Amino acid sequence: MTARRPVFRYVIVKVADADANLLESKLAAAVMRLGGVLGLARVEPAVVYVRADKGLAVVRVKREGLLLFRAALAAYKEPLARVVKVAGTLRKARAICSSLPGASAELR
């Protein structure tokens, strides 16, 4: 029996700091804090696109871990990122980032 290829969702988030490497490590830490190693394996967050001028980033997560990812962002001790929208393809997520107005650095 062959293993199924994972299905991903692309989460557009508003961030204060647009550094991709730092953001990815903070997101992984947030998921790890809430879901542990198994939760991190279910989510596998990866920053795939950053729009620094608008303060937006696209994070790829596994579909099965989307709820855990959103819960980890909500439960984290400091406002890390705010979910703006979820898309099914990277192409659509980039289009959404381009169409959104410029964002302020403030997160609530």
Image (cartoon, rainbow, N blue to C red):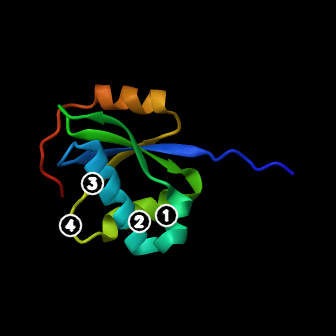
In space, the residues marked 4 and 3 are separated at their CA atoms by: 9 Å
Residue 73: image x %, image y %?
A: 34, 62
**What's the CA distance linking mark 1 and mark 4?**
19 Å
Could you tell me the amino acid type at mark 1?
Leu
Residue 69 location (% of width, % of height):
43, 60
Which type of secondary structure does the marked residue at label 2 adopt?
helix
The residues tagged by marks 1 and 2 sit, at their Cα atoms, a distance apart of 6 Å
Q: Residue at x 31, y 46 (%)?
A: 13
Amino acid type of the residue that numbered disc 2 sits on in the rendered structure: Val
Front residue of this view, candidates 64 and 36: 36
Q: Earlier in the sequence, mark 4 or mark 2?
A: 2
Question: Which-is-in-front pick, marks 1 and 4?
Answer: 1
Q: Are marks 4 and 2 in contact (CB under 8 Å)?
A: no
Q: Which residue is mark 3?
A: 81
Q: Is mark 1 in CB contact (under 8 Å) with mark 4?
A: no
Quote the CA–CA distance across marks 4 and 2.
13 Å
Of the residues under marks 1 and 4, which one precedes in the sequence?
Answer: 1
Q: Secondary structure at mark 4?
A: loop
Categorize mark 4 by other alpha carbons within 10 Å: few (<14), some (14-19), many (20+): few
Find disc 2 in the rendering and name its residue: 31
Whether residue 73 is situated above or below residue 1 in the rendered picture: below
Q: Secondary structure at mark 3?
A: strand
- The residue singled out by tag 1 in the image is 40
Residue on which disc 4 sits: 78
Q: Amino acid at mark 4?
A: Glu
The residue drawn where x is 18% and y is 47% is 17
Q: Amino acid at mark 3?
A: Ala
Q: Residue at x 42, y 69 (%)?
A: 32
